[in-house]
Amino acid sequence: MGASDVVVIGAGAIGAACAYFAALAGHRVTVVERGAIASGTSSGGEGNLLTSDKEPGPELDLALYSQRVWTGALAEHGGLWEYEAKGGLVVAAGELPGLVARQRAAGIVVEDVARPRDLEPQLSPAMTSGAYYPQDAQVQPMLLVAHLLRLARERGARVLTGTEVTGFLRDGERVVGVRTAAGDLPAHDVVNAAGVWAGDVARLAGVHVPVLPRRGFVLVTEPLPVTIRHKVYTAEYVGDVASSDAALQCSPVVEGTPAGTVLIGATRERVGFDRTFSVRAAASLARGALALFPVLERTKVLRCYLGFRPYCPDHLPIIGPDPRAPGLWHACGHEGAGIGLSAGTGSLVAQALAGAPTALELTPFAPERFPEQP
Amino acid sequence: MTEVAVVGAGPAGLAAAVYAAAGGLPVVLVDAGARPGGQYWRQPDPALGAARRRPIFTALEDHVRAGRIRYLPRAEVAVLEPGAPFRLHLSPVTADAPAPPETVTATDLILCPGGYDRQLPVPGWDLPGVLAAGGVQALVKGTRTVPGRRAVIAGTGPFLLPVATGLAAAGGRVVAVCEAGSPWRWARQAHRAALVPGKGLEALGYAAALARHRIPYRTRTVVTAVLGEEHVEGAVLARVDPAGNVLSGTSREVQVDLVAFGWGFTPSLELPLAAGVRTRLDIDGSLVVEVDRDQRTSVPRVRVAGEATGVGGAVLARLEGELAARSLVAEVHRKPLRASALRGRIRRLRAFARALHEAHPVPAAWSRWLTEDTLVCRCEEVPFAAVRHAVEELSATDPRTVRSLTRVGMGWCQGRVCANACARLTADLTHTALTADALRSTARRTLAAPLDLSRLARLDETLP
Amino acid sequence: MTIIFDGRPLQVRAGQTVGAALAGAGIRSWRATRRNGRPRGLFCGIGACFDCLVTVDGQPGQRACLVPIREGMTVDRGHD
């Protein structure tokens, strides 16, 4: 095991993006992943890049910055991960919430849609108002992670899968690398991109980051002829994302895919890492989808999968250096927005690693912002 | 009293249902077939005239008539919810089937889901006219239909024989049976085969039938490609070495319109997995359920019998079903179970099955018959090149990652046809051995059968 | 027995499934795959592979190998 400048813990979307941008900037990067690539949250979602579901604030700023990276620095690679500027349609049975106006004021492009069925002919007539977000896009998350890692490897990075981090190398207070089951990896900087397990990794360094899992299920239908053209969801979705309720929350999110299947989300509940199928969650998803698209009544559902979103109590990710353990950085806690925010996060982390001022202020995402654990 | 739910009405499920009912337990029997018998004991459609009646079918009818067994044919379990009681959410297999009760609850489960043909991709296997050997058997036995004029039956294992002779007896012409293995492997297993009287005579019966129909039985021979534009027009046969490498100069084309492949069977595990049972890798490279000497799994109140505990044929399945039911009856009635003779027969048949598997492995070099274009996943039309790319360029080291990157196993059949082959290919490409974990990673199917969205929306109606 | 396949009458035998009836009549494919438009019909023959999907009496997505023939039944190719 040789010396490397940066070790990234976790080969999900965040870790892969950090590795890619760090390698691009000339760092020698080693990614360490205890399982397979994207075996955590990155393989349990839908690959959404959204600005439409965010309240004005630091997370929205990060999402807008991330959009600029997707369509800027990463644009040439978009085909590799099936980047599609699909657009998002938020609908309501009645008036749209005031959120739309606030989002517009904060810089999101949003068009009022007087007749939502013009954009989505199969939508329930009960949905009488809509807002269209052309900046919302989609990628295939597995391909994203796989290709970011491949591109990083082409720039000299190493990716070690099946390798668990068991501890940190310290020089006094400073973190100077990681211990793994396969040997020590010295490094100048270590990035904790371990998703839902970021708290466990941080604990190995003696620091606390309050990342907790928030379970979600997704239904997958049979392949259909084109039925749903955008990502479609109801305005309640934003409230669910921002809620701190532990109990099951469900609000419908429905979209078509190039393969013809329709993906149906979204549920959120805090049940630890319970992987048991929840009949209640699945039935709620089905009801929600039928309320938006009654045409799906006889459509067959082929599969149901789940994922655990890594979230923090204040619903903001953790990005930046950890002053409690110099040399350790965190890039985690992105809840259900990790795929979309990966481009921006990776880019910012690389900037910060180089000691440069970052394009976006990282203070709102500081790891030390939480009260110390008793 | 809440019922015992038996899933599957093949030899194992029939035996389990009948013995449980005879022991005084109320039984609900759920089966996807239109008639009892499963695959092994497939009965022809009644419109085709009376067939040989096994006594167990009559026993089933008696119990159903007496109200001791609630029999639900043409129904599949779409969702198995573990818990006390278990809840089985049912779905009719086709729209014209009578709607079963939507949910069945039971305090005990005896799962006998059986198995289906294991598939290996080969160039041209996606042409119409390529069928699974078990599919040909189902057509001939169940509907008296011959699905082609000239056939080659290929693969490995004794099941190729009844498929060939059955097809020939029904009027099809079988130009060859291609057995990838060799009879010499049998000699090494002879001591185990000798444990089961009657198996030798059975083989003799097939040899006579093959001779009578003039069907050449070619050992160390495989079909390396199926030929045709829009449907099967021919096949390439080749001789192979013990590992399955094609011997140069031995390839020849035959004109056929039907190719039936039989590479053994693979158990249907989605329901046992949904119940949470422990599984292991069996000697034939299949994931199977671990059971104790009474057919109990690692999950209380869940028993599994038949192919799902290890592929071993109809007689073994029937005995396991009987043992599962009798052990449950004894438990419920708090009586001792005297079944040492039964367990002895099961042990001997399992040993015989192991000998069979060792004599008829999937040839190690089978993936060398593939071209870059050969489909690995039929449903999503994913070629071998994509699987190779995922492993060699995109850091995929396990079948689940391969699936997520390439869509192998994400179509209608959810990997039933391709998952085993994909796992073997991934192991080959990463130079590792096939493991139970690798198979488990793509074996779980929470939705064990497709379910209408509107039906799914009602799934929690019976929850407290 | 007569069924209507793709709008035309087809003579079939009682006791067959739709899949068996079509295969027995020499019709070996009744579906085209989504991506490459390749022909498909029966494959596993026992309901596990979902290759043989066909529309029966207006109901799409039926496994032809599991649907028993009925007099006057309409069977149509699916549209993937």
Image (tube, coloured by chain):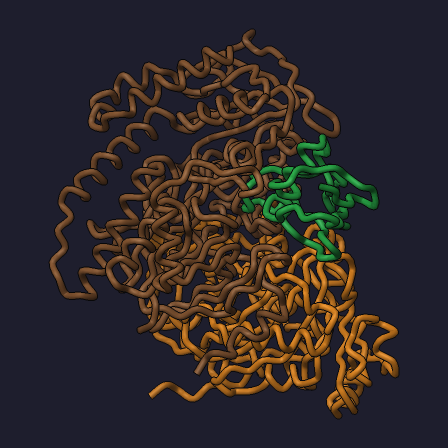
- Residue furthest toward the top? B249
In the figure, residue A355 lies in which quadrant? bottom right
Q: Can residue A169 be seen in this view?
A: no
Q: Is residue B270 visible?
A: yes
In the figure, residue A17 lies in which quadrant? bottom right
Residue in the image at 64% along x and 72% along y:
A358
Residue in the image at 61% along x and 62% along y:
A301
Between B220 and A254, the one lying in front of the other is B220
Chain A pictured colour: orange
Q: Position of residue B156 (x, y in %)?
A: 44, 25
A46 above or below B267?
Answer: below
Residue in the image at 51% along x and 87% along y:
A245
Between A148 and B160, the one lying in front of the other is B160
Chain C pictured colour: green
Q: Where is residue A292 in the image (x, y as percent from the top left)?
A: 72, 77
Q: Please state, as top left, top right, bottom left or bottom right, where the N terminus of chain B lies in the image.
A: bottom left
Q: Position of residue B94 (x, y in %)?
A: 61, 55
Chain that is brown in the image? B
Is residue A194 left or right of C54 when viewed as pictured? left
